[in-house]
Amino acid sequence: MTLSVAPLVEMTGPRRLLLLLLLPAGLFWLLQAFAPFLSLMYLGRLGSTFVFTIFKPLLPALATELSEASVRGRLVFVQAAISSGAQLAVYAMASLLPWGLTTALCGPPFLLLFVATLFVPESPYWLVRQGLTEEATDSLRKLRGADKDVGAEADEIRKGLEQHTNTTMIDQIKQLSAPKHLRPVVFLTAVFGVRELGGQYVIFAYTVHLFRKAGVALDAFVCTVLVGLVRFVFTIIASAIADRFGRRPLFISSCLACAVAYAVGGGFLLLELPGTSWVPLASVLTYAASYSLGIGIMPWVLLGEVLPTPVRSLGSTICTFHFSLVQFVVSYVFPALLHATSVGVVLVIFAAVHVVLTAILVLFLPETRGRSLSDLQDVFAPRSQQVDSEGDSASDSRGKETPEGKEEVIE
């Protein structure tokens, strides 16, 4: 289903697509809670998975296109903080309430989100891609405030897209052949894939099982709630510092910290030192904190920032499909790997993967903090094209139009 996201976004618009999915999302949760037959519960689960598959790439890209550069990273991290808080609430409810009631309580928030989205304008970038420039300017006025001049920002969006009037997926596929469009897609695909190979999904999905296998002294469900609490707190911290320290240092340091947490936890489990049963819990909590500060949400921030506007819908679909595919493979292989080896060996493998991801980030990750989306469109372009672009801008500034309509070159 991931491959259907880009055509749906281009056909309906990201904001409209979000509205169309929010109410069914809540109904699918209620169906799981109150289904009289097992087949209907499976249908609700399948529907929830379908909606989540579209939400995952849609929300960060929409938030990026709606927000100003100065608050763009903070906004996506706030979204992640809300998600972490909701996950913590579900962990707590699951330990205190019956399964059916916990599942039912996951439905009503989608109604509140639907009402809130009614007041959100459509993405100005999508409107420009559809040739609706006046509607895009109106959208910017609603987003920035009626008293703020949005003419310059509207012109910047239009100029960034005037060379790529792509409104169909065929057009975006053609644009993807350009190196400056293909390179960021390949980079982010690698980031998402390697990150999933680092085991982030299994750490949070198999938390209870991992703690029991590791022999942690505390109750496994209490440990799970602690993990959720740490994620929530540190995601809030990340939302406060995301636009202050920059994407690159935050992402790289977060990835290194995750590698160290994995290595320490795995090493202590392999050595089987007496009196160290608390170390796996401390390692997982440290991993959860480091993950929340950067590696957890930063790829989704970059998904909206470094993918060029002409291929953003297609690029985000490719990255999300690869993310879902690798996540499925890891979740499928993990139980067999854990059975064949041990928790310690698995954690050491995950640490090595994070070292590889750190190297990728150091070599290829650009800094995007405070830069407009138009400015970031050529950040992965070959250096010769960047020089040509700068030269064109310089030549434009040296020439001006005379009253007779001829260009006069100013020495």
Image (spheres, rainbow, N blue to C red):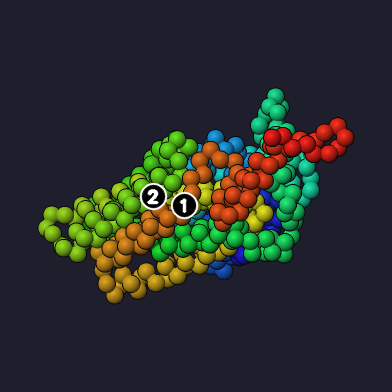
Q: Of residues 99 and 391, which is closer to you in this image?
A: 391
Q: Of residues 8 and 315, which is closer to you in this image?
A: 315
Q: Of residues 46 and 178, which is closer to you in this image?
A: 178
* Residue 105 as seen in the image, left or right of residue 284: right
Please state the horizontal and vertical placement of residue 67, each as a whole percent of the image.
Answer: 60, 39
Q: Is residue 21 above or below residue 69?
A: below
Q: Is residue 16 above or below residue 370?
A: below
Q: Residue furthest toward the left?
A: 274
- Going from the N terminus, do you reach mark 2 or mark 1 first? 2
Please state the horizontal and vertical placement of residue 142, each as a whole percent of the image.
Answer: 70, 33
Secondary structure at numbered mark 2: helix
Name the amino acid, label 1: Leu
Residues packed near mark 1 inside 10 Å, few (<14), some (14 to 19) or many (20 plus): many
Q: Is residue 344 above or below residue 69?
A: below
Name the amino acid, label 2: Ile
Q: Which residue is pictured at 28% across the width and 53% down the height?
A: 261
Q: Gap between marks 2 and 1, in whole Å? A: 9 Å
Q: Residue furthest toward the right?
A: 404
Q: Residue furthest toward the front?
A: 411
* Res. 308 in view: yes
* Residue 231 as seen in the image, left or right of residue 1: left
Q: Residue 365: which numbered mark, if any?
A: 1
Residues packed near mark 2 inside 10 Å, few (<14), some (14 to 19) or many (20 plus): many
Q: Of residues 364 and 22, which is closer to you in this image?
A: 364
Q: Which residue is pictured at 42% across the width and 67% down the height?
A: 331
* Res. 29 in view: no
Quadrant in the picture for residue 269: bottom left
Secondary structure at numbered mark 1: loop
Quadrant in the picture for residue 111: top right
Q: Are marks 2 and 1 in contact (CB under 8 Å)?
A: yes
Q: Residue 252: which numbered mark, if any?
A: 2
